[in-house]
Image (cartoon, rainbow, N blue to C red):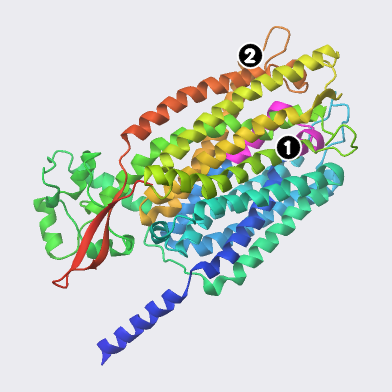
Amino acid sequence: MEPENKKDEESMEMSKQKKLGGIKTLPFILANEICDRFAATGFRSNLITYLTVQLNMPLVKASNTLTNFTGLSCLTPILGALIADSFAGRYWTIVAALLIYELGMIIITISAILPQFRPPQCPTQLNCKEASQSQLAVLYISLLLTSIGLGGTRPCVVAFAADQLDISKAKKQTKGWNFFNWYYVLLSLASLSALTIVVYIQDRVSWGWGLGIPTIAMVVAFVVFLVGSSLYLKAKPEGSPFVRVVQVIVSAVKKRGVSVPIDDKLLYENKDLDAGISKDGRLVHTNQLRWFDRAAIITSNDTTHLLENSPKLWRIATVHRVEELKSIIRLLPFVSTGILFVMAYSHQSSFTIMQAQTMDCHITKTSSFEIPPASMEIFDVLATIITITLYDRLFVPFASRYTKNPSGITCLQRMGVGFIINICATLVGSFVEMKRKNIAQDHNLIDQPTHIIPISVYWLVPQYSLHGIAQGFYQVGKLEFLYDQSPESMKSTAMALYWTAIALGQYAGTLMVTLVHKYSAGKNGRNWLPDRNINKGRLEYYYMLVTGIQVLNLVYYFICAWFYTYKPIEEVTKSNEDGGLELVVDNNTQ
């Protein structure tokens, strides 16, 4: 009777699991993510103004503070992914992260309301008193908490939403629905709302309300996510993927003197051992990076333990686990190419806003309404939304007729297009800066940093738009590529890699600005990136330098794409005539 009861319990558990997840959970998850993005964008997009105007920071110091904070918030997802995949699971990691993020938002909102947390105002931007160490400490604590919070949500929310759906099945069944495209569109709409509403309040009403509204939005995000808790499919973590990766490396090192067999069927495989980390199918052996195959070689020292079905995982690894490591290693070159892509547009939240502050921001020549400089990022977001929509609705159906690919073109091709457009964006930015400074020179305004130059802020629209189009191609393509090509037990890790590239790109931007500021200084004290008066700088040279670096990065990307091997996976399709399971290898080329 006991075996039957056990089977009944397992059957009930499986039935319960099938009822969880699905499309019905997405409104709660996406509503949470939309509120989260609204809050994060409202907080980040105009932060350069808060640092330079409210805290009287010099421009370069403020720019580096901003990029360092952005970089840290994109680096912490590695820790969040480790916690989620190892023991906490994605659901509880998201819950804890939202609480930490909210605490950081509350602190900076209070500091914006109470005057003792800010230095005296300095409208002339001359001989300004900077924020004290204690005032900066409050700022840094709040930035640290928000960075830690983002470290928990960023690697987990996308993977958690995808857990509720069968992404691989959806890909095969329909050409008209792409989760990653529409996920990015919804987040872009949230950013658009923040750039129009929150930034206007920060510039025209008060910073207390300007930061208070994003704080309230985070509370809403937390509540909405909790409401859907009973509907979520909460995948149990199957142990740390980082530990498995280290085990494979250690096993390979221990057997470094052993020759790899020509026949890969002689390598160690264990379906039962890998069952929890290969529910969608086991990874198939590939001939790349064969040095790591040594970890799966069965030696005389392993035989006894294998016969007892108790393999020593620090001495031997299955083919699936070796291929997990190979899959991650193959993704690293593409992660590295994203560093310079991000570096190229990291100035959008600093120098480009400072440019806009010197330009005519009236919405029309006859209107008294002015566009807040930080709201110019609207054109970036709009371009992204329009690009993704047209790509999904028009380009994919058209291209798939000729390529026979349900996605139109591969993710790698999509990313390559994004690289090329991003190069055009920074090149255009250099010519716009030349135009702005020539007009300032004509009107003798080079030495007047607080005066408005008679040139419309709409001159910045082309570079904003090109950056937005580039992100619509590159970032969405990369998001889907990393999720699709990563091992199933490392989806959070793959999302962490996505954010890690952004983090390193922000730090690369900080390093670039610091080096240019230091080594471009002339004997008269002027350099390409001045502290206070951007009119005296050579920002156009900086943009040209970034353009040249991107061209080299594009060549590197094409080399990586040419030699890339897609992840082959063994999938169970149907029962054969003898009642056994028929397996096929899916060599995904999305």
- Report helix, strand or loop for mark 2: loop
Q: Quadrant of residue 443?
A: top right
Left or right position of 300 against 95: left
Left or right position of 18 against 72: left
Q: Residue furthest top?
A: 523
Front residue of this view, candidates 575 and 119: 575
- The disc labelled 2 sits on which kind of residue? Ser
Percent position of residue 419, x then y: 50, 32
Percent position of residue 444, x then y: 85, 13
Identify the mark nearer the N-term, 1 or 2. 1
Q: Start and end of the magenta stretch?
A: 48-71
The verdict on residue 56 being magenta is: yes
Residue underneath mark 1:
376
Q: Looking at the rendered structure, which numbered label has been put on residue 478?
A: none
Please say whether residue 314 is visible from this viewpoint: no
Q: Residue furthest bottom?
A: 1
Q: CA distance from mark 1 to mark 2?
A: 28 Å
Instruction: Please state the total of marks drawn on the protein image.
Output: 2
Residue underneath mark 2:
520
As drawn, 449 above or below 227: above
